[in-house]
């Protein structure tokens, strides 16, 4: 644990929040069993002010074209906040609120606030982006790395969801703009769920975890052996260009996701 890390507890659930490491949730233990992949880059990090890849790092706001650093060449990926230190606004036994002020290379001033709220059987993450100056396009999302196996020789996790469509993915890993019927995995793909994100992870005989959000987009990534990712977000990859959501002084951008678990 580094200085400034926060531990939340409720029932037999325990969450570690790492403001100094990108405002991420570093761990979620239920009955002593860790659900999130451990490591500096893992846990569950906030994707803000954009989610997934921006094509060639470029996005347009009116007549202005902005260029973000290409941290996943030839694209820019997952926002800037996961590489920054966040500040702790307040904490209690089962809740933390942390903030991050948008700064270079992002071209607009704004503040991101993330609330992490734990109960005995759920974790709710809520994020908002506010501005008091110029309006700008933005996205919010979360990128959790769930352990594929919970150890003890148990079966690997199963992913269950019923999306309305899958975004066709080009060779550059970005949506082409066409929608297809959902295809079998493995995936590094974006899906549409117009009724809200609703994905169930089941570790047979151990635990069922339901990931829900009012948002309508989810990226599922299960191409790595150690972990699977289920990422609710406010728009698809490259969404700053294709589905911009505007943050204005009167209207912040807000989103939340809840993970609810049941013992099997």
Image (spheres, rainbow, N blue to C red):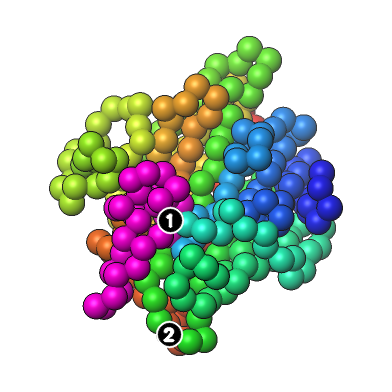
Upstream in the sequence, badge 2 or badge 1?
Answer: 1
Magenta span has 66? yes
SS state under label 1: loop
Asked if marks 2 and 1 touch (Cβ < 8 Å), the reply is no
Image quadrant assignment for residue 148: top right
Q: Position of residue 243 (x, y in %)?
A: 28, 64
What numbered label is drawn on residue 43?
A: none
Q: Is residue 254 visible?
A: no
Q: Residues in magenta? A: 50-78
Q: Position of residue 28 (x, y in %)?
A: 69, 41
Furthest residue toward top? 153
Is residue 36 depicted above or below 231 in this figure? above
Which quadrant of the figure contains the N terminus? top right
Circle 2 residue: 134
Magenta span has 145? no
Closer to the camera, 8 or 12? 8
Image quadrant assignment for residue 98: bottom right
Q: Position of residue 213 (x, y in %)?
A: 46, 55
Label 1 neighbour load within 10 Å: few <14, some 14-19, many 20+: some
SS state under label 2: loop
How many angstroms separate mark 2 from mark 1 (CA)? 22 Å
Which quadrant of the figure contains the C terminus? top right
Closer to the camera, 149 or 73? 73
* Residue appearing at x 36%, y 63% in the figure: 67
Q: Position of residue 163 (x, y in %)?
A: 30, 43
Left or right: 218 with respect to 61? Answer: right
Closer to the camera, 147 or 157? 147
* Residue appearing at x 55%, y 70% in the figure: 103
Circle 1 residue: 69
* Residue appearing at x 40%, y 60% in the figure: 68
Closer to the camera, 101 or 98? 101
Q: Nearer the viewer, mark 2 or mark 1?
A: 1
């Amino acid at each position: 644990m580094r200085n400034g890390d926060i531990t939340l507890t409720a029932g037999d659930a325990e969450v570690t929040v790492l403001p100094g490491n990108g405002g991420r949730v570093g761990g979620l233990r239920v009955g002593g069993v860790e659900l999130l992949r451990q490591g500096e880059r893992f846990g569950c990090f906030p994707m803000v002010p954009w989610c997934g890849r921006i094509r060639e790092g470029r996005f347009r706001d009116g007549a202005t074209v902005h260029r973000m650093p290409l941290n996943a060449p030839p694209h820019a990926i997952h926002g800037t906040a996961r590489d920054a230190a966040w500040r702790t606004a307040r904490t209690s036994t089962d809740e933390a609120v942390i903030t991050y002020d948008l700064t270079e290379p992002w071209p607009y001033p704004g503040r991101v606030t993330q609330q992490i709220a734990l109960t005995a059987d759920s974790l709710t993450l809520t994020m908002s982006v506010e501005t008091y100056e110029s309006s700008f396009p933005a996205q919010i999302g979360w990128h959790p790395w769930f352990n594929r196996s919970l150890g003890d020789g148990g079966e690997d996790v199963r992913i269950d969801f019923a999306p309305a469509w899958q975004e066709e993915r080009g060779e550059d890993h970005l949506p082409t703009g066409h929608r297809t019927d959902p295809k079998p995995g493995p995936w590094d793909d974006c899906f549409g769920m117009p009724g809200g994100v609703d994905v169930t992870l089941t570790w047979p005989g151990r635990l069922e975890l339901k990931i829900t959000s009012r948002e309508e987009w989810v990226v599922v990534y299960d191409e790595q052996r150690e972990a699977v990712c289920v990422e609710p977000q406010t728009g698809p990859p490259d969404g700053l260009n294709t589905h911009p959501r505007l943050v204005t002084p009167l209207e912040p951008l807000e989103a939340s996701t809840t993970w609810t678990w049941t013992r099997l």
